[in-house]
Image: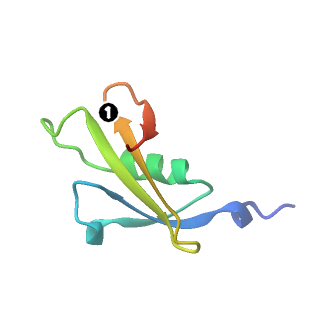
Amino acid sequence: MADITSDKRRFRVHARHIDGHHGRVLIEPTFEAAAIAYVENMHVSPGEGDEISIIVRDLDSGREHCFRLDLETGETRPCG
């Protein structure tokens, strides 16, 4: 039986508008999956806008990606 966890990585994830010290460590296979897992359990207050920026850092490699998520449509794109 294959080890399913072998392709999982540790990511530190936080919303750009929240201090990075309040981020979460998540174990997911990709940067995108970590961003989605973070947002699924995040409370977003009404009036914070229709978009949120999520910063995802791979704890092993140090690589970082930023995603902008449209809360109304669910579309995701790179920050820019």
Can I make out residue 41 in this image?
no
Q: Residue at x 27, y 67 (%)?
A: 22
Q: Secondary structure at mark 1?
A: loop
Could you say which is closer to the camera, residue 55 or residue 10?
55
Q: Residue at x 16, y 42 (%)?
A: 45
Q: Residue furthest right?
A: 1
User: Residue 19 is drawn in which quadrant?
Assistant: bottom left
Identity of the amino acid at label 1?
A: Leu
Q: Position of residue 57 (x, y in %)?
A: 47, 64
Q: Position of residue 58 (x, y in %)?
A: 53, 66
Q: Position of residue 37 (x, y in %)?
A: 46, 50
78 on left or right of 7? left
Colour setup of the view: rainbow
Q: Is residue 15 above or below residue 78?
A: below
Could you say which is closer to the camera, residue 36 or residue 16?
16
Could you say which is closer to the camera, residue 73 or residue 78?
78
74 on left or right of 31? left
Q: Residue at x 74, y 60 (%)?
A: 4
Could you say which is closer to the camera, residue 80 or residue 36?
80
